[in-house]
């Protein structure tokens, strides 16, 4: 399920992800608690490609103030040369508070 924001989400920018990268970690630190049901949805052409949840790619710190998403480039080899938007739901269930974009690039290996 792809959620819609009720406000303008924070855009953390665009990054490159090689198809050979394993365990690329994106961490976010906050001054507010992250919800236990946090999720990140990778979207391409308005279609959810993969959902990251706690225990399946997402890790929340014990203090509930840092959340990390771990992404493998091999999950997106079929999208080489394209971009994905990652919609992040960290604080209010069903809201998109943060987005970032990944350009999927072909591995040089």
Image (cartoon, helix red, strand yellow):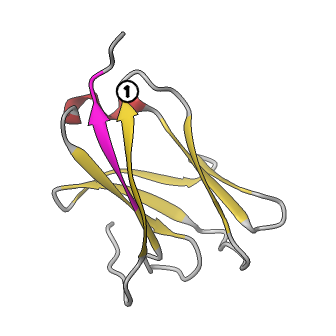
Quadrant holding the N terminus: bottom left
Closest to the observer, 38 or 31: 31
Q: Does the magenta stretch include residue 57?
A: no
101 shown above or below 5: above
Q: Main secondary structure of the magenta part?
A: strand
Q: Which residue is drawn at 28% across and 56% down?
A: 43
Quadrant holding the C terminus: top left
Give the residue number, with chain letter if any, for mark 1.
74
Instruction: State the image coordinates of residue 17 (x, y, percent, origin top left).
Output: 38, 35
101 shown above or below 75: below
SS at mark 1?
A: helix
Q: Among all residues in the image, which is located at the extreme top?
A: 109
Q: Residue at x 59, y 78 (%)?
A: 91
Instruction: State the image coordinates of residue 11 (x, y, percent, origin top left).
Output: 41, 68
Q: Is residue 102 magenta?
A: yes
Closest to the observer, 89 or 98: 98
Instruction: State the image coordinates of residue 86 (x, y, percent, origin top left).
Output: 38, 58
Relative placement, left or right, of 95 versus 3 is: right
Q: Which residue is drawn at 32% across and 79% down?
A: 4
Please give the range of residues in magenta: 100-106
Relative placement, left or right, of 73 versus 49 is: right
39 shown above or below 80: below
């Amino acid at each position: 399920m792809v959620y819609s924001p009720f406000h303008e989400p924070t855009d953390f920018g665009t990054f490159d992800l090689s198809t050979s990268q394993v365990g690329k970690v994106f961490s976010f630190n906050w001054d507010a608690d992250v919800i236990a049901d946090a999720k990140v949805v990778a979207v391409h052409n308005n279609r959810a490609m993969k959902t990251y949840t706690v225990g399946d790619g997402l890790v929340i710190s014990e203090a509930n103030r840092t959340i990390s998403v771990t992404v493998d480039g091999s999950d997106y080899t079929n999208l080489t040369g394209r971009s994905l938007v990652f919609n992040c739901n960290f604080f209010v269930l069903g809201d998109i508070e943060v987005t970032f974009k990944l350009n999927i690039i072909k591995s040089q290996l």
